Amino acid sequence: MKKLEDYSEDIYKCTKCGFCQAICPIYRETRLETAVSRGKFTLLNGILLGKVGFTPKIGKYLDMCLGCKACYDFCPAGINAEEIILAARAKYSSIHGVGWLKRMLIWLFKSNLRLKLFGAALNIYKKTGLYAITTILARFLGRVGSVINVFNAQLKENVRYKKLSAISEQKSLKIVYFPGCINAYANPSAANAVKMVLERNGYKVTVPSDFRCCGIMAMSAGDLDTFRELAAHNVGLIPDDTDVLLTDCASCGSAWHNYPDILEGELKLKAETIAQKAVNINEFLDKIQLYIPESTVLNQSVTYHDPCHLSRFQKVTEEPRNILRKIPGLEYKEMEDASQCCGAAGSFCIAKPEISLAISKTKAQNIADTGAETVLTSCSGCKIGLAQGMAVSGVQKPILSPVELLARLYLQEENE
């Protein structure tokens, strides 16, 4: 990956026009110049010229970025601020470390054993009645109750796996599915849906059991050594004859496209090949002759939130909407600013909870204004952002992914 010094010309190219102020979600809430790209570039230019040191205060300013890439769309100079800020974080982390909170989260997510233990604890929480008790208590606990609701919402298994018969002969396409940490250890609902929808459409999917975290949290924190370690491990698990690498979490998919930048030698070449085969589940389903039951109707209205890592990083926007428009009885309602960041942004919602929540509340209001009964998105992290905004805004709606909705359609057909 490029170093901060490699971006010196791009940083200098910033004309200080301030267009980034109009689109930056953090600036909208804080009105701080250091929140936008222009302010950060001024500081980074000073660092590169030796006028400013890489102090902890600079580190705090670098943390004030969601990595949503919205400013890139508005920048007349075409500067990729997200890449530059990641490079600056990597430089900062090489001097000061990543900080205790990010270090703790990276420590948890980089180990499958720790994630399995964490997942086991969550299962105990769900099955012993604590889940139900805390859900009731949350009604009377104000802000703390909202946090409980957000946490519990991530554990609700919307789709339980059921083997579905294929509507056609099995396809020969060799598909490897990368479920990601949330699907693998916290809530298998989306992963269940992916497997069921693929099986129903005649596709066999393989899931290597040794996959580790995609590493996007480490990359975002500037811990490139951990990101490189995880990337090398995951790339090594992909068989050479794989036709499609499938992801359903936008952030995980984005990480796979970053792997070639962090690896070297043979692994880099393999990562480049895999990146060309890596597609999001919405993209895949939109391209195939997707089976839609003619006589089964889902009578509900839905709206869709575009994850930043899917819409801006992978350019997948119309595909999920195309799928939704095919479902009989479904009424699609477009929300205002559907592609604006939900505010979660990985560890940002933990590190900067007040700003994150303010951004999420704006999104929740846009959702409420549609009048839709169900909210859809294609990212595990975005589900957290949507849930926290809706929890404190009193907006009560289920949050699903489009593929979970499809799985429900197939299950409803089976039961009719």
Image: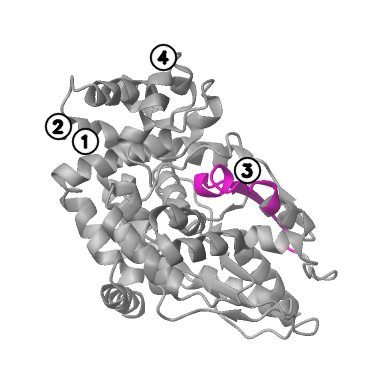
Tag 3–tag 2 contact (CB < 8 Å): no
Read off the residue under disc 3. 371
Read off the residue under disc 4. 16
Q: Residue shown at 28%/47% (left/top)?
A: 222
Estimate the x, y position of residue 384 in percent, counting from the top left. 42, 53
Which of disc 2 and disc 3 is earlier in sequence?
A: 2
Read off the residue under disc 1. 59
Can you say which quadrant of the picture contains the C terminus? bottom right
Estimate the x, y position of residue 200 in percent, counting from the top left. 71, 78
Q: Residue 55, labelled with which disc?
A: 2
Q: How far apart are marks 2 and 4 (CA)?
A: 23 Å
Tag 4–tag 1 contact (CB < 8 Å): no
Tag 3–tag 1 contact (CB < 8 Å): no
Task: Identify the amino acid type marked 3.
Answer: Gly
Local crowd at mark 4 within 10 Å, few (<14), some, or many (≥20)? few
Instruction: Kindly indicate the quadrant of the structure image that contains residue 2.
Output: top left
Task: Identify the amino acid type marked 4.
Answer: Lys
Q: For marks 3 and 4, give the one nearer the viewer.
A: 4
Along the viewing direction, whichever of 183 and 295 lies nearer the viewer? 183
Q: How far apart are marks 3 and 4 (CA)?
A: 40 Å
Local crowd at mark 1 within 10 Å, few (<14), some, or many (≥20)? some
Q: How far apart are marks 3 and 1 (CA)?
A: 41 Å
Q: Is residue 239 left or right of residue 53?
A: right
Q: Is residue 154 left or right of residue 89?
A: right
Residue extent of the magenta highlight? 298-319
Residue 186 visible, this angle: no
Task: Identify the amino acid type marked 2.
Answer: Thr
Which of disc 4 and disc 2 is earlier in sequence?
A: 4
| Snapshot colouring | one colour
